[in-house]
Amino acid sequence: MNNKYHHIAIALAGATQSAILVPQLANTGVCSAILYERAIKSVFKTSPKTTDDVYDGIENVKTGLQTLIQLLSSGQKEQVQIIRYIFGTLSITSKLLKNNDALDKIDQRLRRISGLYSEMNDETVSANVDDLSYSLAGIYSDIISPISTKIKVTGKIEFLQNSLVQAKVRTALLGCVRSAILWYQVDGSRFQFIFCRKRICNAAQQLLDQINRAS
């Protein structure tokens, strides 16, 4: 898998998969537990050996790949929010990557959080999901949010005012930022959304086919 657009599609699928969680949380107060916990785990993957290592394998971004293909090929009205959250985090991440002080602070905070647990595996994340949500939300609000225009999250007021839902929304956005960092690292750029949509779509479909063959 050495096609540049395969790596771009994986990273964008990761960002998309985290972005899906934001409207779920904002409108219902809950979200897919599996996808949310995968987003949390990806945040702690700070030294991956490969692109898909950030997600422990491409099969873990299957939902993101499926949604990415829909976003790039149809752009239906109900998907506008997801696109807005993706583009918002890509914009924030471009500024974050120029701010070494902020990147160092994020790394320090992640090390401190992970140091509280013996291993950041599925069991640890699942058993401590609320505590991790508050800790990671703190990174987003303290370090990332101040460096750029805030992303406006829309939804139902009763959920947006709930402190745990707020923490989970910020954690989901942090998951988007993690994938956006990866996207920039594999030479993702905004002009690709205009000129290379078909290539990204084709790469995402090839990855989906690969996942389906293996399952």
Image (cartoon, helix red, strand yellow):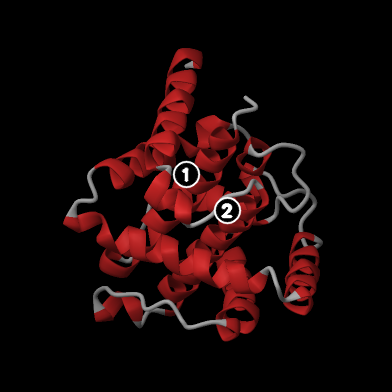
The amino acid beneath tag 2 is Ser
x and y percentages locating residue 174 in the rendered image: 56, 65
> Where in the figure is residue 157, as x and y percent of width and height?
26, 81
Q: Residue at x 66, y 50 (%)?
A: 124
Asked if residue 28 lies left or right of residue 103, the reply is left
Total marks placed? 2
Residue 181 location, x and y as percent?
Answer: 63, 57
Instruction: Check disc 2 and report the residue beneath it.
Output: 179
- Looking at marks 2 and 1 on the same chain, the residue that comes earlier in the sequence is marked by 1
Residue at position x 61%, y 74% from top?
95
Q: Is residue 61 visible?
A: yes
Cβ atoms at labels 2 and 1 below 8 Å apart: yes
Q: Nearer the viewer, residue 93 or 178?
A: 93
Q: Which residue is mark 1?
A: 13
Q: How far across and how far down the image is residue 2, in percent?
A: 65, 27
* Element class at badge 1: helix
Which residue is depicted at the point 64% across and 75% down? 139
Can you tell which quarter of the image residue 68 is in? top left
Above or below, 65 against 127 in this view is above
Residue at image coords 63%, 51%: 182
Amino acid at pointer 1:
Ala
| In the displayed structure image, the side of residue 15 where residue 101 appears, left or right | right
Q: Residue furthest top?
A: 213
**Mark 1 Cα within 10 Å, few/some/many (few <14, many 20+)?**
many
The quadrant where residue 137 appears? bottom right
Query: Where residue 104 is drawn, which disc sits there?
Result: none
Out of 204 and 132, give the one closest to the viewer: 204
Q: CA distance from mark 2 to mark 1?
A: 8 Å
Looking at this view, name the residue that lies furthest to the front. 195
Crowding near the residue tagged with mark 2, few <14, some 14–19, many ≥20 C-alpha atoms within 10 Å: many
Whether residue 24 is visible, yes or no, is: no
Q: Tell me: residue 150, above or below residue 84.
A: below
